[in-house]
Amino acid sequence: IIGLLTAASMQTFSKATRSYQGIHVDVVVTSGLSNSRAAGAEADYFVLCENEGSGDSSDDGGTDGDQRTGANPIKPGTINTVVITNATLTPAALVEAYAIAIEAKCRACANHSVTCAKSPSELAQGTGTDCCVLIAASETVAGANSNTRRVKHAGKHT
């Protein structure tokens, strides 16, 4: 069971399915873009955990630019991506597939010319609250199901 939160309209919901040699991949995405960000954009909120474990929570480390409570609150917007496959993935393939899912999100943002809300001259790679989940068949399920395919690598060249 997974749970992802979003304030994005469900009108942004998209689903894609691809299959190859008995391996099926489904991708489900919701995309709110109002708080789009470029990698390296200045943070909206910053906290250092210098007193971690001390029980002192009097200083949250917030800056004067904390937009969560200011006159310009951060607008809701999240790109949630769920990738589901019937294949069993090795640890290497899991990492590679997850990286490609993130790269695909960045490419979609570039293809649609999504700009950074903080620096409109820069392209955004997503939002500050994005989440991606990759779900693959487990070895236990694969052992019980002779039709489950095991993928060793999931890179762009393999």
Image (cartoon, rainbow, N blue to C red):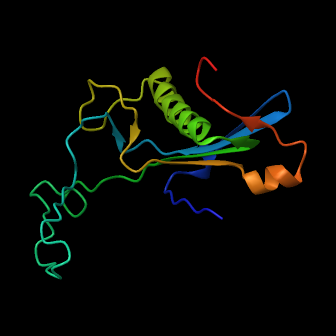
Q: Residue at x 89, y 50 (%)?
A: 145
Residue 36 image position (x, y, % from top left): 37, 39
Residue 157 image position (x, y, % from top left): 60, 17
Q: Residue at x 27, y 56 (%)?
A: 73
* Residue farthest to the top, as pictured: 157
> Viewer-proximal residue, 139 or 119?
139
Q: Is residue 73 left or right of residue 139?
A: left
* Residue farthest to the front, as pictured: 143
Residue 63 image position (x, y, % from top left): 11, 58
- Which quarter of the figure is the C terminus placed in? top right
> Viewer-proximal residue, 5 or 1?
1
> Viewer-proximal residue, 22 or 114?
22
Position above or below: 110 against 9: above
Q: Is residue 99 left or right of residue 119?
A: right
Position above or below: 92 against 62: above
Quarter assignment of residue 83: top right
Quarter assignment of residue 140: bottom right
> Viewer-proximal residue, 101 or 53?
53
* Residue farthest to the bottom, as pictured: 55
Q: Residue at x 25, y 35 (%)?
A: 40
Quarter assignment of residue 41: top left
- Which quarter of the figure is the N terminus placed in? bottom right
Position above or below: 135 against 17: below
